Image (cartoon, grey):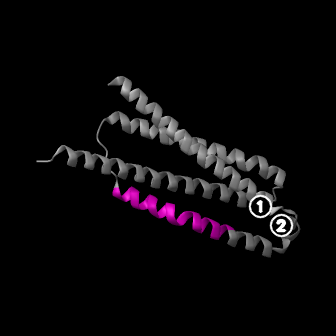
Protein backbone atom coordinates (compact mmCIF):
# COMPACT_ATOMS: atom_id res chain seq x y z
CA UNK A 1 0.00 0.00 0.00
CA UNK A 2 1.31 3.39 -1.00
CA UNK A 3 1.59 6.16 1.54
CA UNK A 4 0.56 9.74 1.01
CA UNK A 5 4.21 10.76 0.71
CA UNK A 6 4.84 8.26 -2.10
CA UNK A 7 1.76 9.45 -4.00
CA UNK A 8 2.82 13.11 -3.59
CA UNK A 9 6.34 12.28 -4.78
CA UNK A 10 5.00 10.46 -7.84
CA UNK A 11 2.74 13.43 -8.59
CA UNK A 12 5.70 15.81 -8.39
CA UNK A 13 7.80 13.64 -10.69
CA UNK A 14 4.91 13.36 -13.12
CA UNK A 15 4.46 17.15 -13.15
CA UNK A 16 8.19 17.67 -13.58
CA UNK A 17 8.40 15.19 -16.45
CA UNK A 18 5.48 16.93 -18.21
CA UNK A 19 7.19 20.30 -17.75
CA UNK A 20 10.40 18.95 -19.27
CA UNK A 21 8.43 17.33 -22.09
CA UNK A 22 6.75 20.67 -22.80
CA UNK A 23 10.12 22.43 -22.76
CA UNK A 24 11.55 19.96 -25.29
CA UNK A 25 8.49 20.23 -27.56
CA UNK A 26 8.49 24.05 -27.46
CA UNK A 27 12.25 24.15 -28.11
CA UNK A 28 11.83 21.83 -31.11
CA UNK A 29 8.95 23.89 -32.51
CA UNK A 30 10.87 27.14 -32.09
CA UNK A 31 13.89 25.55 -33.81
CA UNK A 32 11.70 24.58 -36.76
CA UNK A 33 10.25 28.10 -36.95
CA UNK A 34 13.71 29.67 -36.80
CA UNK A 35 14.80 27.37 -39.62
CA UNK A 36 11.86 28.63 -41.66
CA UNK A 37 12.94 32.24 -41.04
CA UNK A 38 16.51 31.43 -42.12
CA UNK A 39 15.17 29.67 -45.22
CA UNK A 40 13.13 32.78 -46.06
CA UNK A 41 16.23 34.94 -45.60
CA UNK A 42 18.12 32.76 -48.07
CA UNK A 43 15.18 32.85 -50.45
CA UNK A 44 15.41 36.64 -50.36
CA UNK A 45 19.16 36.54 -50.94
CA UNK A 46 18.65 34.24 -53.94
CA UNK A 47 16.14 36.67 -55.42
CA UNK A 48 18.06 39.87 -54.79
CA UNK A 49 16.02 41.44 -51.99
CA UNK A 50 17.36 44.68 -50.57
CA UNK A 51 17.83 45.29 -46.84
CA UNK A 52 14.81 47.59 -46.78
CA UNK A 53 12.69 44.72 -48.08
CA UNK A 54 14.23 42.29 -45.61
CA UNK A 55 13.50 44.61 -42.70
CA UNK A 56 9.77 44.36 -43.47
CA UNK A 57 9.34 40.90 -44.96
CA UNK A 58 11.32 38.84 -42.46
CA UNK A 59 9.42 40.15 -39.40
CA UNK A 60 6.08 39.84 -41.23
CA UNK A 61 6.85 36.29 -42.36
CA UNK A 62 8.03 35.35 -38.87
CA UNK A 63 5.02 36.91 -37.11
CA UNK A 64 2.61 35.07 -39.39
CA UNK A 65 4.48 31.77 -39.04
CA UNK A 66 4.82 31.97 -35.25
CA UNK A 67 1.25 33.21 -34.86
CA UNK A 68 -0.30 30.45 -36.93
CA UNK A 69 1.77 27.85 -35.08
CA UNK A 70 0.79 29.26 -31.68
CA UNK A 71 -2.91 29.23 -32.57
CA UNK A 72 -2.69 25.67 -33.95
CA UNK A 73 -0.92 24.47 -30.80
CA UNK A 74 -3.52 26.20 -28.62
CA UNK A 75 -6.34 24.51 -30.54
CA UNK A 76 -4.65 21.11 -30.24
CA UNK A 77 -4.06 21.59 -26.51
CA UNK A 78 -7.64 22.70 -25.97
CA UNK A 79 -8.99 19.69 -27.87
CA UNK A 80 -6.80 17.29 -25.92
CA UNK A 81 -7.81 18.87 -22.61
CA UNK A 82 -11.49 18.25 -23.39
CA UNK A 83 -11.00 14.49 -23.59
CA UNK A 84 -10.40 14.33 -19.84
CA UNK A 85 -8.05 11.36 -20.19
CA UNK A 86 -4.91 11.56 -18.09
CA UNK A 87 -2.17 11.96 -20.67
CA UNK A 88 1.03 10.02 -20.77
CA UNK A 89 4.20 11.29 -22.34
CA UNK A 90 4.51 9.87 -25.86
CA UNK A 91 8.03 8.47 -26.02
CA UNK A 92 8.42 8.64 -29.81
CA UNK A 93 7.33 12.28 -29.89
CA UNK A 94 9.70 13.07 -27.04
CA UNK A 95 12.64 11.42 -28.81
CA UNK A 96 11.88 13.13 -32.14
CA UNK A 97 11.46 16.53 -30.51
CA UNK A 98 14.66 16.02 -28.50
CA UNK A 99 16.61 15.22 -31.68
CA UNK A 100 15.11 18.24 -33.45
CA UNK A 101 15.78 20.52 -30.49
CA UNK A 102 19.40 19.42 -30.19
CA UNK A 103 20.50 19.25 -33.82
CA UNK A 104 18.28 21.47 -35.97
CA UNK A 105 19.61 24.87 -34.96
CA UNK A 106 23.22 23.72 -35.34
CA UNK A 107 22.60 22.34 -38.82
CA UNK A 108 20.51 25.36 -39.80
CA UNK A 109 23.44 27.64 -39.09
CA UNK A 110 25.88 25.31 -40.87
CA UNK A 111 23.69 25.07 -43.97
CA UNK A 112 23.14 28.84 -43.86
CA UNK A 113 26.90 29.44 -43.84
CA UNK A 114 27.35 26.92 -46.65
CA UNK A 115 24.63 28.58 -48.74
CA UNK A 116 26.16 32.02 -48.18
CA UNK A 117 29.53 30.76 -49.37
CA UNK A 118 27.87 29.40 -52.54
CA UNK A 119 26.21 32.78 -53.13
CA UNK A 120 29.54 34.57 -52.67
CA UNK A 121 31.19 32.18 -55.12
CA UNK A 122 28.56 32.87 -57.78
CA UNK A 123 30.10 35.53 -60.01
CA UNK A 124 26.72 36.71 -61.29
CA UNK A 125 25.74 37.67 -57.71
CA UNK A 126 29.03 39.31 -56.72
CA UNK A 127 27.80 42.89 -57.03
CA UNK A 128 24.56 42.14 -55.17
CA UNK A 129 26.28 40.19 -52.38
CA UNK A 130 28.84 42.95 -51.86
CA UNK A 131 26.06 45.52 -51.46
CA UNK A 132 24.21 43.53 -48.74
CA UNK A 133 24.82 44.70 -45.19
CA UNK A 134 25.03 41.27 -43.53
CA UNK A 135 25.42 42.74 -40.05
CA UNK A 136 22.05 44.44 -40.36
CA UNK A 137 20.49 41.41 -42.09
CA UNK A 138 21.54 38.99 -39.35
CA UNK A 139 20.43 41.51 -36.70
CA UNK A 140 16.98 41.57 -38.31
CA UNK A 141 16.80 37.78 -38.28
CA UNK A 142 18.20 37.35 -34.77
CA UNK A 143 16.10 40.09 -33.14
CA UNK A 144 12.96 38.93 -34.88
CA UNK A 145 13.40 35.31 -33.78
CA UNK A 146 14.41 36.35 -30.25
CA UNK A 147 11.37 38.58 -29.76
CA UNK A 148 9.00 36.04 -31.27
CA UNK A 149 10.49 33.17 -29.26
CA UNK A 150 9.61 35.04 -26.07
CA UNK A 151 6.23 36.10 -27.45
CA UNK A 152 5.53 32.42 -28.23
CA UNK A 153 6.38 31.44 -24.64
CA UNK A 154 4.35 34.30 -23.15
CA UNK A 155 1.38 33.36 -25.35
CA UNK A 156 1.66 29.78 -24.12
CA UNK A 157 1.78 30.89 -20.49
CA UNK A 158 -1.23 33.15 -20.94
CA UNK A 159 -3.18 30.47 -22.79
CA UNK A 160 -2.52 27.75 -20.24
CA UNK A 161 -3.23 30.15 -17.36
CA UNK A 162 -6.56 30.89 -18.98
CA UNK A 163 -7.24 27.17 -19.46
CA UNK A 164 -6.38 26.51 -15.80
CA UNK A 165 -8.65 29.34 -14.68
CA UNK A 166 -11.60 28.05 -16.72
CA UNK A 167 -11.03 24.50 -15.46
CA UNK A 168 -11.10 25.73 -11.86
CA UNK A 169 -14.39 27.54 -12.51
CA UNK A 170 -15.97 24.37 -13.90
CA UNK A 171 -15.05 22.30 -10.86
Tag 1: Cα neighbours inside 10 Å, few (<14), some, or many (≥20)?
A: many
Tag 2: Cα neighbours inside 10 Å, few (<14), some, or many (≥20)?
A: some
Secondary structure of the residue carrying tag 1 is helix
- Please provide percent x and percent y for residue 166: 41, 27
Q: Is residue 128 left or right of residue 57?
A: right
Q: Is residue 97 magenta?
A: yes
Residue 88 can be seen, yes or no: no
Check the image and report above or below for 57 versus 108.
above
Residue 56 shows which numbered tag? Answer: none
The quadrant of the rendering that contains the C terminus is top left
Q: Give the farthest residue toward the front.
A: 5
Q: Quadrant of residue 66?
A: top right
In this orientation, which residue lies closer to the viewer: 141 or 127? 141
Residue 129 shows which numbered tag? Answer: 2
Q: Is residue 6 magenta?
A: no
Q: Is residue 54 left or right of residue 89?
A: right
* Magenta residues, start to end: 91-112
- Please provide percent x and percent y for residue 138: 74, 59
Asked if marks 1 and 2 touch (Cβ < 8 Å), the reply is: yes
Residue 41 can be seen, yes or no: yes
Q: Is residue 39 left or right of residue 135?
A: left
Question: What residue is drawn where x is 61% and y is 58%?
Answer: 35
Question: What residue is drawn where x is 86% and y is 71%?
Answer: 126
Q: Which residue is mark 1?
A: 45
Amino acid sequence: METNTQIMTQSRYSSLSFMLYGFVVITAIVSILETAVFAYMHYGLEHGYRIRRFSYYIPCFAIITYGVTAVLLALIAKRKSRTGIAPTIPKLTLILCLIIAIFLQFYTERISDWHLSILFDDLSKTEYMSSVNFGKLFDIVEYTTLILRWAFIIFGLAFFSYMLKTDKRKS
